[in-house]
Amino acid sequence: MNRQNLTVLTEFILMGITDHPELQALFFGLFLIIYTVSVVGNLGMIILTKVDSRLQTPMYFFLRHLAFIDLGYSSAVAPKMLVNFVADQNTIPYNWCATQLAFFILFIISELFILSAMAYDRYVAICNPLLYTVVMSQRACWVLVAIPYVYSSCLSLIITIKIFMASFCGHNVIRHFYCDNLPLLTLLCSSTRDIELIILIFSAFNLISSLLIVLVSYILILMAILRMNSTEGRHKAFSTCGSHLTVVVVLYVTLFFMYVQPKSSHSFDTDKIASIFYTLIIPMLNPMIYSLRNKEVKDALHRIWKNLHKPPM
């Protein structure tokens, strides 16, 4: 490893979303609105599921962590992206780039397994309702969120350290709007075989294993729903799963498109569009999906609204 290169390279240049100056102001306004809605929506979901007494169930415990994760990885990317729309030079310090990559990987992997935990929670609630409170105890819920956080933190550190301990040979122009692992790999002049293999294996494992848990859970849920005699029971079961399924489909389709493809077929312009979708659009949509499609969340919002506008005694 060339230690000199590690000391000389102090910053990276982010190419950004567009190289057309006339579009910078438009994109700044658009993404500022999207990020603001995302922050308000996810913070609102965190607060709502924390303070409302009727939302103190495992389902909303996981939903609170999903909102925290969405807030985390959108905030790892959006603020710097917005600054670069109005800055003269789209630079990011070397250490900030490493930090941004580490946090982004941590949150995106955590989201996959939190969604898996949510699918398992729905499986237990619908297929084993009598054992639900026993199986999904507070301790079990904390274990199901702690394992993804610890695992994703370790994997994030491994990938970030492997990339930033390699030699960049003075190349510092990143063809992206944030520090992602694939654009960074193109800047390395040392062998990237080991790092690429680690990313490929763990990306495939994370996507396939988490998706498998979701698929098995929902196959068993569907079988249980079809055995129900009550039309009302079927409708309630479908309604509790609909929001989660929508979120899962949107995220997994985007991530499979982004990461499970050969390096030779990668188009960074296409990847930028996919990245915008899962770093900004999905975190904005998730709280909307869960609030608009969930009667309990809508009722909780209504109760808070009534309390806020209650005339003083």
Image (cartoon, helix red, strand yellow):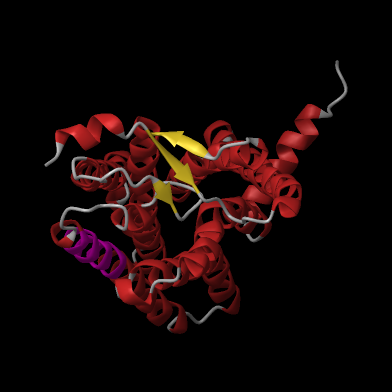
Q: Is residue 271 above or below residue 33?
A: below
Would residue 278 appear left or right of 290 to someone viewing this image?
left
Judged by its main secondary structure, the magenta piece is helix
Q: Is residue 54 left or right of residue 260?
A: right
Question: What's the residue at 55%, 60% (across, down)?
Answer: 277
Residue 274 percent coordinates (x, y)? 51, 65
Residue 75: horizontal and vertical position, in percent? 52, 39
The outermost residue toward the top is 313
132 over 4 or under it: above or below: below
> Within the image, what quadrant is residue 42 found in?
top right
Residue 7 x, y percent position in the rendering? 25, 29
Start-end of magenta stretch: 196-208
Closest to the observer, 239 or 204? 204
Rendered position, 209 above or below 194: below
Residue 186 pos. (x, y %) = 31, 58
Q: Closest to the observer: 298 or 274? A: 274
Q: Is residue 209 above or below residue 50?
A: below
Q: Residue at x 51, y 52 (%)?
A: 279
Task: Please give left or right for residue 281 compared with residue 158 in the image.
Answer: right
